[in-house]
Image (cartoon, rainbow, N blue to C red):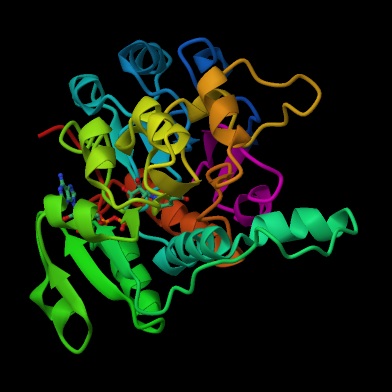
């Protein structure tokens, strides 16, 4: 059988080996992200592989269709960055990796909580400067704290399992509550109002959709307890950045752990250390001593990378062999 050529966009050194080891496709790797301007890199590629920050809008998809692209494999779970209506109209099939090591993301969310609660990042900065002073480093224990978990899918439930070990009181919200989750643990499904008014930490694990866009806005920040923390490993658009900054400036909020950011496409997973950044909101966020910004790395473990590659390749083979695409996403 002739080996299909597949274009892989926004690839990183650390993920190529998982694809290079495979013998039944020829992969052409591009560091660049896919946008309507970079579709010209697709030459004789009927299939392409993309990542979270590729811009799969209508203009890009139309250009891909003209170049003969018939399949897009997303190397990620979220598909909010794909215009599915356009893809369906243009007969381009889209598949994703629905779940990969949710534990990796959940552990990262817990890491953000512990780091913020114990001011761990500040301690490390001090000791690097040979400053062993402890003043200002009094932290909070997670033990018996109230944690709001919004979205109890794969990642949310994994986080709940971890929080259970800290004897946290868990308030959960999901459009499809799972009664099994409440068994044997201190967890209750409740309203968003109760979550925001009662939680010491609120952690976001719903997908970004028109309904969840700016789920955390001025109103929700105002509802939060004095000194409460927001943890976002979901998607940047779940939080209205201006509302978050206002909540931090007024010291209403105790801090935020942000692995995602509304305008992250321009900066995340790239090196701007020589150039600096033009995004004043991102710069303001990073200036707060009680905000942790990471570059969409919650998923980034060896376990996740191997699971993402395995499912991406399975999806690709199903498409090549004209079989049912079990992980297809389409416009409904
Ligand atoms: P999942 O699909 O297993 O769970 C999502 C949950 O959200 C489901 O239980 C669903 O019922 C609920 N939900 C959806 N829309 C809702 C709404 N409008 N209101 C209330 N509940 C709603 O997804 P999973 O694997 O837990 O991932 C969650 C999100 O985490 C992904 O959509 C993605 O955006 C993000 N993510 C971030 C990563 C990172 O590295 N920072 C890595 C992987 C995922």
Locate residue 276 relative to residue 192 in the image: left or right: right
Q: Residue at x 26, y 51 (%)?
A: 323
Q: Is residue 275 above or below residue 332?
A: above
Locate residue 306 relative to residue 29 in the image: left or right: left
Nearer to me, 107 or 304:
107
Q: Is residue 52 visible?
A: no
Quadrant housing the C terminus: top left
Q: Is residue 307 above or below residue 83?
A: below
Q: Is residue 200 visible?
A: yes
- Name, please, the residue furthest toward the front: 135
> Quarter of the image holding residue 235?
top left
Magenta includes 244? no
Nearer to me, 240 or 13:
240
- Image location of residue 146, percent across then percent down: 30, 68
Nearer to me, 11 or 188:
188
> Quarter of the image holding residue 161?
bottom left
Nearer to me, 70 or 257:
257
Locate residue 255 relative to residue 294 in the image: left or right: left
Q: Residue at x 23, y 63 (%)?
A: 152
Report the magenta residues as a range.
Answer: 1-27
Q: Is residue 179 above or below residue 91?
A: below
């Amino acid at each position: 059988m002739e080996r299909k050529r597949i274009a892989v966009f926004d690839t990183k050194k650390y993920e190529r080996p998982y694809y290079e080891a495979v013998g039944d496709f020829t992969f052409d790797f591009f560091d660049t992200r896919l946008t309507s301007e970079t579709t010209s890199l697709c030459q004789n590629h009927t299939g392409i592989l993309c990542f979270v920050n590729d811009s799969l809008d209508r203009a890009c998809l139309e250009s891909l269709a003209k170049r003969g692209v018939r399949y897009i494999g997303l190397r990620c779970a979220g598909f909010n960055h794909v215009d599915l209506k356009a893809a369906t109209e243009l007969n381009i099939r889209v598949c994703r990796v629905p779940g990969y090591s949710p534990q990796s993301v959940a552990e990262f969310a817990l890491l953000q909580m512990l780091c913020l609660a114990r001011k761990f990042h500040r301690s490390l900065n001090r000791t690097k400067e040979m400053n062993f002073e402890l003043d200002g480093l009094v932290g909070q224990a997670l033990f018996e704290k109230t944690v709001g978990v919004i979205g109890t899918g794969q990642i949310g439930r994994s986080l709940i399992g971890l929080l259970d070990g800290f004897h946290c009181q868990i308030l959960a919200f999901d459009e499809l509550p799972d009664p099994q989750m409440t068994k044997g643990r201190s967890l209750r499904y409740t309203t968003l109002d109760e979550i925001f008014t009662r939680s010491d930490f609120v952690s976001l694990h719903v997908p970004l959709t028109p309904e969840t866009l700016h789920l955390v806005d001025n109103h929700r920040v105002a509802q939060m307890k004095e000194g409460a923390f927001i943890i976002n490993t979901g998607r940047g658009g779940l939080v209205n950045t201006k509302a978050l900054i206002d909540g931090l400036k007024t010291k209403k909020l105790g801090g935020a752990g942000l692995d995602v950011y509304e305008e992250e496409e321009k900066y995340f997973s790239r090196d701007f250390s020589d150039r600096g950044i033009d995004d004043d909101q991102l710069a303001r966020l990073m200036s707060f001593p009680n905000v942790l910004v990471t570059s969409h790395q919650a998923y980034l473990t060896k376990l996740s990378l191997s699971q993402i590659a395995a499912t991406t390749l399975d999806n690709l083979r199903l498409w090549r062999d004209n079989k049912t695409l079990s992980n297809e996403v389409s416009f409904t």
